Image (tube, rainbow, N blue to C red):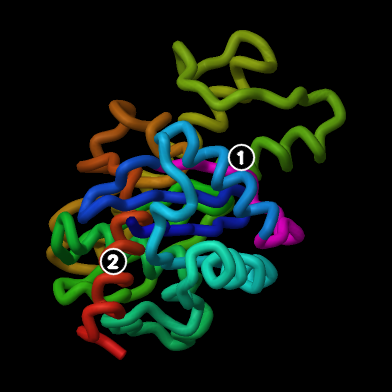
Amino acid sequence: MLLAIDVGNTNTVFALYKGAEPLVQWRASTLASRTADEHAAWLAQMLQFQSLGLDAIDDCVVSTVVPQMLFHLRNLARRYIGVEPVVVANSGAPGVPVRIDRPEQVGADRLVTAVGAYMKYGGPLIVVDSGTATTFDVVGADGGFDGGVIAPGINLSIQALHDAAAQLPRIAIEKPDAAIGRDTVSAMKSGVFWGYIGLIEGLIHRIKSEYANIEKVVATGGVASLFEGSTEAIDVFDPDLTVRGLYEIHRRVRSGAVG
């Protein structure tokens, strides 16, 4: 089985693939100092819930936007799986043309997610990924990465509001009953939720005005499901884009389809 690891700034997703479909996914807090041995101990515990052990894994693919994590994850694959992992870094994803001015600046997570979206939905399309940042990435008709937008994530905005204003409490993200709040908390919830809907709709509209023939808008990421049913600007909500992209990149490398 294949272990696919996607390291984000806030969370790390571990997906176990049996064939072309993910068998199970686990999410852990990203901690750059966590060693290979600590990862292995945690992973062994999670595998027990599936009546499996570490010996069930025979290959590994890693994508990370936290460079400090890569050393430990390489060692995890080498020591406990017995392989040199396929690694996707900011230098590019195998088989993905990156058509921007500074290709080396594109996060590995954005490239992997673009691959996952293109494999299922084709292109051109827009991928909206709601995580630590909210990104809007354009994937071309050939699967190439044609640029995008980076905005603060919704949780960062909530944290900034709470930290900067002494009398504003920390709130949870949820859809309010009405746009007009009748107290401080409901006003904040409305501003955060409907403000992000406005951000999403406005940026999708602007991207479509600059890039012709967008066929689909796909949303993914940790908080994307909160917006499902609240905007017609997004066509599909799909939580598995990144792990699907990791599987495809691993397939390309191991099959020799790319260098």
Report the front residue among 74 and 6: 74
**Residue 155 in picture, x, y percent from top left:** 61, 39
> In the displayed structure, does residue 76 sit left or right of residue 204?
right
- In the drawing, what numbered circle is on residue 203? none
Q: Which numbered disc, 2 or 1, marks the residue that appears first in the sequence?
A: 2
Quarter placement of the N terminus:
bottom left
Name of the residue lying farthest toward the right? 166
Q: Element at badge 1? A: helix
**Residue 241 in picture, x, y percent from top left:** 31, 53
Residue in the picture at 39% in, 83% down? 100
Above or below: residue 15 compared with residue 82: above
User: Is residue 27 highlighted in magenta?
Assistant: yes
Above or below: residue 80 compared with residue 173: below
**Residue 135 in picture, x, y percent from top left:** 45, 57
Residue occupied by mark 2: 115
Q: Element at badge 2? A: helix
- In the drawing, what numbered circle is on residue 155? 1
User: How busy is the neighbourhood of tag 2: few (under 14 within 10 Å), some, or many (20 plus)?
Assistant: many
Point out the stretch of residues depicted in magenta. Answer: 25-36
User: How busy is the neighbourhood of tag 1: few (under 14 within 10 Å), some, or many (20 plus)?
Assistant: some
User: Is residue 148 highlighted in magenta?
Assistant: no
Q: Three-letter amino acid code at disc 1?
A: Asn
**Badges 2 and 1: C-beta atoms under 8 Å apart?**
no
Above or below: residue 154 compared with residue 210: above
Tell me the CA gap for discs 2 and 1.
26 Å
